Amino acid sequence: MAAVPAAGTRPRTSLRRSRAKRRAGRVATYLVAAVVGLFSVFPLFWMVLTSIKPRAEIVTRDPVFWPSEFQWERYGDVLARGFTTYLGNSLFIATTVTVIGVLVAALAGYSLARFDLPLKRYLLLVVLATQMFPVVVLLIPFFAVMRQLDLLNSYTGLIITYMSFSIPLAIWILRGFFRGIPDELEDAALVDGCSRFGAMWRIVLPLAGPGIAACSIYVFIAAWNEFLFALTFTSSDDMRTLPVALQAFIGRDATDHGAIMAASTLFTLPVVSFFLFVHKRLTEGMVSGAVKG
């Protein structure tokens, strides 16, 4: 005759199985995250590794995963070729576009989210439609306008151009964040004596911090990586930006791959630094949204 399980044995067995399943799921999640992380980070690792390899180990039939010697002096050579000038140009243009662009997008997004403007629906469609045109289509019209305004080969011309194609999407992003903030909070601030601008500055903008961080990252990276307009609108060497300067390492007969990778590493550092600067606000918004969801 089969033995009868003692009272309480079946729940304990079920509990152990449940814990084992959760543990296995957690391990699988970590493994997938590790694979995705390695897949994402490997190009950056290979870029840095290539920048310090000897020339003979860069272009080889079998990849060299660890250099026989480290050639750090390649970074000094890149900086000696005027890299700091190009870095300064890119930093100034990208930072200016980000500050002015996000400010304009915040004011426009707030107005579109809070006020009943005439023809508001069609205005939103026009803002969205600007993102449907390929950037290359706008090259010739922008060039003609900038030449007419005598803004070619100038910071102002590039800043205006970059803002024209980065602000519309930023407006849409921030409008969505502003609409997610309850009107009652702003009404309470108005009752307490705040002006409309004061309520926006003290109540709405801090709550929309994650959206502003996301827009800042988008606008900064769009301006930082832009190549086509910078190549077309600048003619003097001291006005070149980093993406344009990188092509100088590509020659007709030979390409300095090590210098390209060293310059690309330096080119990536400001973007990573900016992301680390704003990622806390971005993460707070993602976590807050997950909890609310």
Image (cartoon, rainbow, N blue to C red):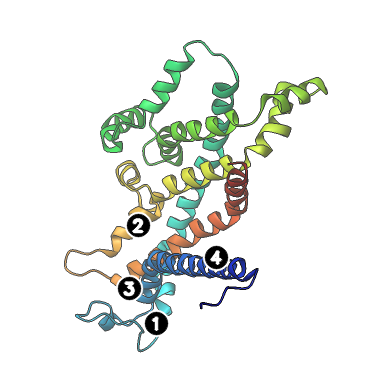
Of the image marks 4 and 2, the number of the one nearer the N terminus: 4
Contact check, label 3 and label 1, Cβ < 8 Å: yes
Contact check, label 4 and label 2, Cβ < 8 Å: no
Quadrant of the image for the C terminus? top right
Q: Is residue 145 above or below residue 21?
A: above
Of the image marks 4 and 1, the number of the one nearer the N terminus: 4
Q: Residue furthest front?
A: 1
- Residue 278 location in percent, x, y? 59, 51
Q: Nearer the viewer, mark 4 or mark 2?
A: 4
Residue at (50% x, 52% y) in the render: 91
- Residue, disc 4: 18
Q: Taking 192 as reference, is 159 left or right? A: left
Quarter of the figure with residue 115: top right
Marks 4 and 3, how far apart at CA: 53 Å
Label 4: element kind? helix
Of the image marks 3 and 2, the number of the one nearer the N terminus: 2
Residue type at mark 2 is Ala
Q: Nearer the viewer, mark 4 or mark 3?
A: 4
Residue type at mark 3 is Gly
- Residue, disc 2: 245
Marks 1 and 2, how far apart at CA: 22 Å
The foreground one among 81 and 246 is 246
Q: Taking 278 as reference, is 32 left or right? A: left
Label 2: element kind? helix
Residue at (17% x, 64% y) in the render: 252
